[in-house]
Image: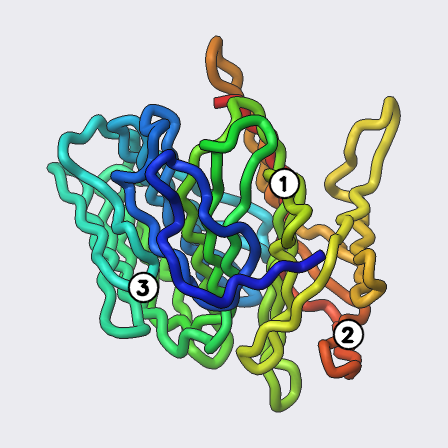
Amino acid sequence: MQKKITEPTDLLNKHGELIQTGYATTPLLKYNRKDVTRKGRLKEWDYYMINNESYAFALTVGYSAGYLLISISIIDFINRTEQSKSVIKHVHNWYLPESSQIGDILYKDVRTDLKIIHKGRDRGIFLYLDDFLPDSALTASISLSKEPKDSMVIATPFKENKKYFYYNQKIVGMSALGSVSIKGSVYNFDTSNSFGLLDWGRGVWPYKTTWYWSSAFDFLVNNTFGFNLGYGFGDTSNATENMLFFNGIANKLDQVDFGISKKFKNKYDYTKPWNFTSSDNRITMTFEPIYDRNLTLYAVLFSTRQHQVFGKFSGTAVLDDGRTVYLNNLLGFAERVVNRW
């Protein structure tokens, strides 16, 4: 079943529980931080990824329990390399916006200057990090425009507790213009071949979670095409986050499976081809990995195992009106993340 939210309401009631569950193509539900009853476990983030065929720039701004996370990565698809840096700060009276549509993100200290500015449906990302590399700063200035008409929006409950929720918007296929500079190297993004993605999330969820997520976008002849696919996170019996985007219009899918290759002892082999399918038989895609951006951290109360794999998709996708879109080496990513936090 795919339950579509059509009426605007608050996200949570006075008990901190979801009023509506399901999906939408625009953020109709209003998130209010004051309505969250489990504030100690509240997690909020804005994740941006800007990419072209050669490289990607990823920026995470997250907030939880008084701590700010700023994480930056440059991924080089040609040389199959990555440069990353994370900054964690204890902050007072600092919060992320309660809406994905309005509000700016501002943070500054002696080493970091971050601004994410809203201007209507456009966004500007401005970042200076003094010590991105031991001997070099990072400077980024990127404009995102032409936000598509539709996006993926979902309000997801968790069976473990009625006060757990996940409210998420993913905007796929914004036009990107700008550059990132590091130690004499300049990574340029142009609207002719570069695109921006926003993953905006707010929620309270269980200590142990696993999610699968994939997205891609590009020009196809005289059209634009992209998708957002995911599963494993929360109770998706009312709705999934699976959508195709054709010329900015959402086409809804049912359940999907990433078909990650496995090796000995049933462990995943992320570098082998993946086989994407859907329960409604509307996608059949092979994903050929280029680079596995992986991270494993273990601590007493915290652990994470992340595999964000960049690669190329080939196959078919069927739109709501029955038309078939043929994909040939569409650049994107697919990930599996296991968290304990």
- Give the position of the N terminus as an image quadrant: bottom right
Q: Secondary structure at mark 3?
A: loop
Q: Quadrant of residue 119?
A: bottom left
Gap between marks 2 and 1 measured at Cα: 25 Å
Hey, which residue is sitting farthest top in the picture? Answer: 300
Gap between marks 2 and 3 measured at Cα: 30 Å
Q: Count the marks: how many?
A: 3
Q: Identity of the amino acid at label 3? A: Gln
Question: Going 67% across and 56% down the picture, which residue do you hit?
Answer: 311
Of callouts 1 and 3, the N-terminal one: 3
Gap between marks 1 and 3 measured at Cα: 26 Å
Residue 104, disc = none
User: Which mark is in front, 2 or 1?
Assistant: 1
Disc 3: which residue: 101
Mark 2 surroundings: few (<14), some (14-19) or many (≥20) residues within 10 A? some
Of callouts 2 and 3, the N-terminal one: 3
Disc 1: which residue: 235
Q: Secondary structure at mark 2?
A: strand
Residue 318, disc = 2
Q: Identity of the amino acid at label 1? A: Asp
In this orientation, which residue lies closer to the viewer: 20 or 233?
20
Residue 132 appears anywhere in the view: yes
CB under 8 Å between callouts 2 and 3?
no
Q: Position of residue 49 (x, y in %)?
A: 45, 56
Q: Quadrant of residue 220?
A: bottom right
User: Which mark is in front, 1 or 3?
Assistant: 1
Q: Identity of the amino acid at label 2? A: Val
Going by the image, does 167 lie left or right of 77?
Answer: left
Question: Going 50% across and 59% down the picture, which residue do you hit?
Answer: 153
Q: Is residue 91 above or below residue 324?
A: above
